[in-house]
Image: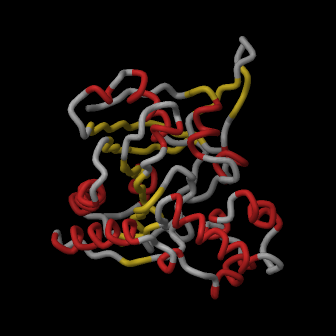
Amino acid sequence: SGIHLPVFEHTELFARGIGDGTDVVDKEMYTFNDKGGRSITLRPEATASMVRSYLENKMGSLQQPVKLWCAGPMFRYEKPQAGRYRQLWQFGVELLGADGPLADVEVIALGWQYYRELGVEATLVLNSIGCRQCREEYKKALVAYLRGGNICKLCSGRLERNPLRVLDCKEDSCQRELEGAPRISQYLCPACQEHFEGVKAGLTALSIPFALDDYLVRGLDYYNRTTFEYKTEQLGSQDALGGGGRYDGLVELLGGPSIPAVGLALGIDRIELMDP
């Protein structure tokens, strides 16, 4: 089903859903007070809004899984450059109510087929960042490794409150410091490892090639287990055409029941910059 989302939401929706310490929440949201003194934010991404709509419209009572899509502008206060705009356009897909690895494969394959039909060459990059339990063990190891290291000022502040964000930092000092850092794949619990193997096996069965990247955590805190991106070498530093992942805890975080979910967002602006 297609969903028409509002251009702005209450700020708390994004602050809670996306996460403290992310670049989106800390630096990139267009936030202001309306005439009633309420803090509202132009949507920087769609998934939190989609989950809010899922809950408000009681879609949990429908036959699961529920498959939703939306398209439209997102807004982020970033330094404009080729492939990066303050008003960007995305197409998004969410699959809520299925927890098996084949749900991840279905969503990833949809994005892959989208690029193939457009004639766009993209590389699929894949990772698993585990569940809350095994991720906490990894965070402890990562903090112990990075503490006292030569990381940027912003990441020094993130180290205690949100250390996974350091993996997403593009500063040269942080990239050098991460070269010998522990990897999340070493800390996955048996259930998360089994889920990830199922995702890889499903993609292989569909003849969808992929590369693994232990540092692919994405820029939003609601992800768990599978994360993925579609990348290109044709757009310089802005190499991500789209991506997504599993976000099993987001529905509950936003006040609903425990509902597993996975989704993706594809950057329409960046696709238009390509030359199929």
Which residue corresponds to the image point at 57% horizontal and 27% vertical from the top-left?
9
Q: Is residue 169 visible?
A: yes
State the colouring used for the structure image: secondary structure
Which residue occupies the foreground of this view, 207 or 81? 207
In the displayed structure image, the side of residue 246 where residue 150 appears, left or right: right
Depth order, front residue of 174/231:
174
Q: Is residue 173 left or right of residue 83?
A: right
**Residue 252 in the image: above or below residue 156:** above
Confirm whether residue 50 shows in the render.
no
* Placement of 119 over or under 97, stated as above or below: below
Toward which corner of the image does residue 258 lie, by quadrant?
top left
Q: Is residue 189 left or right of residue 135?
A: left
Residue at screen point 44% across, 50% down: 247
Residue 255 image offset from top left, x and y in percent: 51, 31
Q: In which quarter of the image is residue 192?
A: bottom left
Relative horizontal placement of residue 35, taking residue 207 as reference (left or right): right
Residue 171 appears at what percent x and percent y?
Answer: 71, 72
Name the one closer to the observer, 202 or 207.
Answer: 202
Counting every numbered tag in the picture gives 0
Q: Please report the residue visible at 73 percent of the width from the left and 77 percent of the height from the top.
A: 144
